[in-house]
Amino acid sequence: MILLKKINKYYTRGSEIVHALREINLEISRGEFIAITGKSGSGKTTLLQILGLVDKASGGNLYFNGIDVSSLGDSNLSKIRREKIGFIFQQFHLIPKLSVFENIALPQFFHRRKIDKERIFQLLKFVHLSEKWKNSPEQLSGGEMQRVAIARALANNPELVLADEPTGNLDSENTERVLELLLKINYEGVTVIVVTHDMEVASRAQRIIRISDGRIIL
Amino acid sequence: MNFFTLAFQNLKRHRTRALLTVIAVAISVSVFFSIFSFNIGFERSLKKEIEGAGIHFMVVPTGCPHEVASLILHGGIVPKYLKESLVEEVKDNPKIDISIPIIVFQHPISEKKNIRLIYGIDLSQLKSIKPNWKYKGSFPRNENEIAVGYDIAKHDGVNLGDKIKFEGRDDSFRVTAILDKTGTQEDAFIYMSIQSAKRILKKQDEITAIAVKVKDARNINSTVDELSERIPGIQIVTMNQVLVSISNVGRSAQIVGISISIIALIVSIMGIVNAVLMSVLERIKEFGMMRAVGASRFDIFRIVVYEAVLVLTSGAFIGVFISSIGGNFIEEVLKSIFPYTPSSRIIEFDPVLAIACVMASLFIGILTGFYPAYLASKITPVEAIKS
Ligand SMILES: Nc1ncnc2c1ncn2[C@@H]1O[C@H](COP(=O)(O)OP(=O)(O)OP(=O)(O)O)[C@@H](O)[C@H]1O
Ligand SMILES: [Mg+2]
């Protein structure tokens, strides 16, 4: 599904050049559940951004469903993102003055300008928040907010779900619930890639990719 | 859900800030709307007032057209006089319907020694020159009766039925009418018959001006030409010239007013740009998230522009509303600033102007939203994922 060939990523920080990813070769198949781990600053988030087509590699090629996306422009990348990829963020990023329902519907709105209510209610049920669809995110706990964010990631039926430290702000009980949801998504055929520090979380993945200093280590 | 809900939810997040910005817009739109209403109404009421006078032109001594212009509407002193015999000469022209001699001068009242403006005219004709006057009491009908302007009555404590004597004369005049406030120089006059005025002035056959009405208004210009040719030593001022000369005086005040409202508008536009810019900078992560879940750059651009548009148009609606209900108050304020304002009501709600104001705000909203929106549209989805 995704193929990375000799991916490099440089950042410039003032006059300094940071080599965040070095010669990454990686193949991800449809339906995998992958955990990316590594020390802080090792390049996990950078890799996830490139996998999610939100940032471009400085060198190398990335094939998404067989298409080389390295040379695509912003609007084409946006299109792939909204049709095929769902994102879950560590800080949830819900919009406080929109209801839970509207937050979940956001990707559908940006995609087709209209909302499939049935699908949203189905997702609410999936994340066990059917009763709270009218609430504002401000009235929810951290665990509930992350479940809303998971539902939002699924709004457009993505093939790939990417999550950067999705449980980083949650206690162990909520971590478990989120993890179960991710496993369930994966069970239904969606490819899931999770960046995590948490070995407990990583241990549930089919495959663990360890990164150190911008390189994949085996 | 639509782009307006997305823009609006953010305004709800910072209620006070949004409210303050809306108020700033409302105030500047209200100033703008009022001043424009006033400017439009100014010319219109001036015209109405002058046409309402039922007079087509004034015959005056040569050399003081400016004084005459203000005399006609508001009273003033013309230092030269005309021979009264000219009234007959003017009347000789068959195109002329009415010609009324008028005499205006200053004279002290015996008791208080206050110098007052006196306006002498054939009393039966006065009403036809000033058809819009309202007054208390009954209009003076004979040589011993006078009407007193509002300011004089107030300042000198004159009541209906009082007797007033003038310096140099023994007989007294009875006040039979006190005029309601007109808001013009007319409030500072004492009105009496032309015979009494001449006796006080001690000039038997001199007058200040002759007010003329022609039979057919289409003949005004030809009549003016004929009179000027035939009678030496006179100057003729038509009502149109008066209109032009007064609106020229008013114009500089109008320009000041418009400048003030443009400055107010610029200030509130800067306020909006600032507020929208702040809200964009605060929401970098949120816009990053939207971009990550599929919003295009133009989608983000629109959300921000709509925010500015919402603020500006709601401010414009409120501003127009305020100036419509506060029209009376605003009119009083502006009348005290503008010189030579017509006494009739000037500010009237003009729906075309109101729509123009709201449309202009919509347009300005789009423009002010552009820069912050452009910045927002540059935000990449990386921002949402960055730790
Ligand atoms: N926008 C950027 N500009 C400059 N340097 C960056 C930028 N983003 C990341 N880096 C650098 O690239 C390297 C990899 O960063 P990255 O965020 O991918 O690490 P990470 O593994 O996700 O770390 P953490 O576990 O702390 O989230 C780090 O040295 C980081 O400082
Ligand atoms: Mg990271």
Image (spheres, coloured by chain):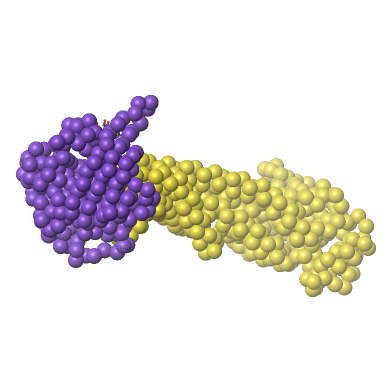
Measured as percent of width and height from the top left, residue B168 is found at: 78, 46
Q: Is residue B259 left or right of residue B194?
A: left
Q: Which chain is purple?
A: A
Q: Which chain is yellow?
A: B
Q: Residue at x 87, y 73 (%)?
A: B94
Residue B289 visible in the shown view: no
Q: Residue furthest top?
A: A15
Q: Is residue B43 left or right of residue B63?
A: left
Residue A37 visible in the shown view: yes
Measured as percent of width and height from the top left, residue B96 is found at: 83, 70
Measured as percent of width and height from the top left, residue A52 is found at: 26, 47
Q: Is residue A27 left or right of residue B34?
A: left
Quarter of the rendering occupied by the C terminus of chain B = top left
Measured as percent of width and height from the top left, residue A32 is found at: 14, 50
Q: Residue at x 22, y 34 (%)?
A: A215
- Viewer-closest of A187 and A178: A187
Q: Residue at x 63, y 57 (%)?
A: B42
- Viewer-closest of B284 and B46: B284
